[in-house]
Amino acid sequence: MARRLEQGSRVRVEDVGERWPDVPDDISLSDLEPQTRRDLRGLSAANAEFVGLHLLAAVLDAQDDPDVAWRHARAARSRGGRIAVVRETVGLVAYRAGEWAEAIQELRAARRMGGGPGHVAVMADCERALGNPERALELSRSPEAEQLDEENALELRIVVAAARADLGQLDAALAHLAAAGAAPVPGRPVRQPRLTYAYADLLERMGRDEEALAAFLAVADADDEEETDAGERLTALADRRAGRADADGDADAATDAADAADGAVAAADATADDDGTPVDGTPVDGDAGADEPTPIEEPTDAAAPVDAPVEAEVEAEVDVEVDVEAVGPAGAPEPADAAEPVPSGDHGPATGAIGLPFSHVDEPQPRRDDSSAPSGTAPLFSDGDLPR
């Protein structure tokens, strides 16, 4: 009977009998924001304490241990699922943990309960992670998207550009960011590092390395909060270009060696013509004192074994050069990512009860046990405080 009662509207079937993680001893309800504590007054004292402490634990673990944070968030939802701030927190923690579908569901519920536009950019990025860039674009055109403040509208713009890149529309994605002032201007500091980072990422994926280097450098100079990994990307791109230059130099050296070998073969052919003996030393048919000149076809054919290895070596070197040139930037979906899913790469802070900031524009951090999720990217949100 107790188990059946536990399966009420506030507890999900998958949560029944779940053993929730322990709450750290060094946190208390006083750590919650006053508004959040007021929202929990609708619960009994015991439930308010249970929900509040698990919310705090979820916030604390969201950055370093998203899986444990997700379990704390589910624990809070099991007893506080009818409170908007709880569902909002659960949704953002689910996003961090790579639970894309859960994140969309929870954030939609929070929007219905609390009103306002909600976290449109996060939901759009989750759609990208689920392989639905078209739905991400639809969300960007929704009435809720028009209600976003400047900061959240900027984050949505980054996600839209990534969705365009997912669809192979790289020029449109770049233009979308440029329209928001993403392109760095020489002599002027970058105002929105994450936006310009996304711009640089697209430039690199399009093979415009010189422009990408300049953009990453501008972001690295302006990113005092270290919201992006522009410095690392700058170094990686510079190293890759240096590697390509070395490969080109090796190919040129191989070509010079081949030319020298060809010259040696030609000289050997000339010697064979003078003494009537081919390069490999095979005697020429006929009497030694015959007046008839020795045909040049045989010496030429005899020289072929020398030429063939040289040509094969040159071709092999050319293949190496082509392979090096073919290496492109990692990341996100179709040449955008970036992340796979980057959804959106390293992505200011999102508004609402939980202010996790965005990090960059690739793909969201993939769920560790989901091989189909986008890979090689950082989550939209990086450091920041969830509502307390």
Image (cartoon, grey):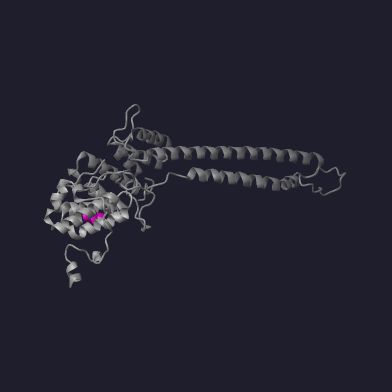
> Camera-side residue: 35 or 356?
35
Residue 181 in view: yes
> Camera-side residue: 144 or 110?
110
Residue 119 image position (x, y, % from top left): 22, 48
Q: Extreme right residue here?
A: 289
- Classify 30 as above or below 225: below
Q: Extreme bottom residue here?
A: 1
Residue 132 image position (x, y, % from top left): 30, 53
Indicate whether residue 76 is drawn in magenta. Answer: no
Q: How many marks?
A: 0
Picture quarter with the N terminus? bottom left
Chief secondary structure of the magenta portion: helix
Q: Residue at x 47, y 39 (%)?
A: 239
Indicate whether residue 104 is drawn in magenta. Answer: yes
Residue 294 image position (x, y, % from top left): 80, 44
Quadrant in which residue 261 is drawn:
top right
Q: Extreme left residue here?
A: 42
The stretch in magenta equals: 103-107
Residue 108 in view: no
Q: Residue at x 48, y 45 (%)?
A: 326
> Camera-side residue: 162 or 71?
71
Residue 277 image position (x, y, % from top left): 80, 44
